[in-house]
């Protein structure tokens, strides 16, 4: 079965803006959520100071985005001295939550914020202390009475569970690198999961252990009632660096996604290309449904 994503012909969708100091060098990994018929994108950007901040862009068709002049989110604590990275957005109980990586001389930590308008944010700070951790994404609803989050303690994808979204425990590794595969070094979750009748559809990235690590994308399917169980995992990558702007850039040979949105019978997968641009690739929902059923 061909699970390969199709690139949008207008790629890359967003690139750095030389006259915006905060996004003059790189724009890349982004979260996207569809709400009231609009696509809202929170994207990672770096300017001359190389500190990561988040910009906000909005679109009616998921392809042409308008961005704000100024970032909407930036470092605000000791944990964020080097910046805020790789946002992932999930609507839970009618509220929009963002999990992201706080980066500082003391390491990387999973942090959380919430918003109603993508511009004003309520900050909760670090939610998983004590351990270097990133690639976090919230499930859109409770599973068996608990909130659930993906996170990554190298090299595996983990889950954590919570009663209140603030205190997290029961860390458990659910999947790791596969020897002899394109994801043999480390893996991390991509977008927040999408609920299907057959299970949770999860986009993830895998890193290959080569001199210059290559980042590619794949799918997993997790059990609906017990997401600790991996039911399926794509054998081949669904997207890998092939275009010039995916192979060359801030960090070469990287496709890295934080966002998957259902739209008009397709999944729209937004990704950072070579840590330099934002691009879009899609797959028909029917193809996914066929894959999960076989
Ligand atoms: C990861 C993250 C991503 C980045 C990727 C490739 O560790 O920091 O933000 O896209 O590396 O450089």
Image (cartoon, grey):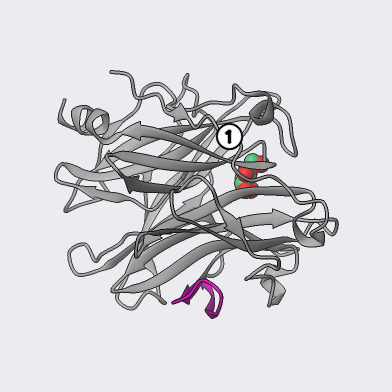
Relative to the observer, which residue lies in front, 82 or 128? 82
Residue displayed at 55% across by 79% down: 120
What residue is disc 1 on? 11
Q: Closest to the observer: 200 or 41?
A: 41
**Residue 256 in view here:** yes
Neighbourhood count class around disc 1 (C-alpha, 10 Å): few under 14, some 14–19, many 20 upward: some
Left or right position of 203 against 125: left
Give the image location of residue 104, x and y in percent.
Answer: 72, 64
Q: Looking at the picture, how far across and down is residue 248, in whole percent?
A: 73, 29
Secondary structure under the numbered disc 1 in the rendered image: loop
- Image region (quadrant) for ligand 1: top right
Q: Is residue 171 visible?
A: no
Q: Residue at x 37, y 74 (%)?
A: 165
The magenta-colored residue range is: 113-127
In this view, 285 is above or below 20: above
Residue drawn at point x = 32 percent, y = 37 percent: 220
- Asked whether 280 or 162 is in front, the reply is 280
The N terminus: image quadrant: top left
Q: Is residue 115 magenta?
A: yes
In the image, taking residue 84 as reference, residue 260 lies left or right, namely left
Looking at the image, residue 107 lies above or below residue 27: below
Residue shown at 53% from the left, 29% from the top = 9
* Position of the C terminus by quadrant: top left
**Residue 74 image point, x, y percent:** 68, 70
Examine the residues drawn in magenta and state their main secondary structure: strand
């Amino acid at each position: 079965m061909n699970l390969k994503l199709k690139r949008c012909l207008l790629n890359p969708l967003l690139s750095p803006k030389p006259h915006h100091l905060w996004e003059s060098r790189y724009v890349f990994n982004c979260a996207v959520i569809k709400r009231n018929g609009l696509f809202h994108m929170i994207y990672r950007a770096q300017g001359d100071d190389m500190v990561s901040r988040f910009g906000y862009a909005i679109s009616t068709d998921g392809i042409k985005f308008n961005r704000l002049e100024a970032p909407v989110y930036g470092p605000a604590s000791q944990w964020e001295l080097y910046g805020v990275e790789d946002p992932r957005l999930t609507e839970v109980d009618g509220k929009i939550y963002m999990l992201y990586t706080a980066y500082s001389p003391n390491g990387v930590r999973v942090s959380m914020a919430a918003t109603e308008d993508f511009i004003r944010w309520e900050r909760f700070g670090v939610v998983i202390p004590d351990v270097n951790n990133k690639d976090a994404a919230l499930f859109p609803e409770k599973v068996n009475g608990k909130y659930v989050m993906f996170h990554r303690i190298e090299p595996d994808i983990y889950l954590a569970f919570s009663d209140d979204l603030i205190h997290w425990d029961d860390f458990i590794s659910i999947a790791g690198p596969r020897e002899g595969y394109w994801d043999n070094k480390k893996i991390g979750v991509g977008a927040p999961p999408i609920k299907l009748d057959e299970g949770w559809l999860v986009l993830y990235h895998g890193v290959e252990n080569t001199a210059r690590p290559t980042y590619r994308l794949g799918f997993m399917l997790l059990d609906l009632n017990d997401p600790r169980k991996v039911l399926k995992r794509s054998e081949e990558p669904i997207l890998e660096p092939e275009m010039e702007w995916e192979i060359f850039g801030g960090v070469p040979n990287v496709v890295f996604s934080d966002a998957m949105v259902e739209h008009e019978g397709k999944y729209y997968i937004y990704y950072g290309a070579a840590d330099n641009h934002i691009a879009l690739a899609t797959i028909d929902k029917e193809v996914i449904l066929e894959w999960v059923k076989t």
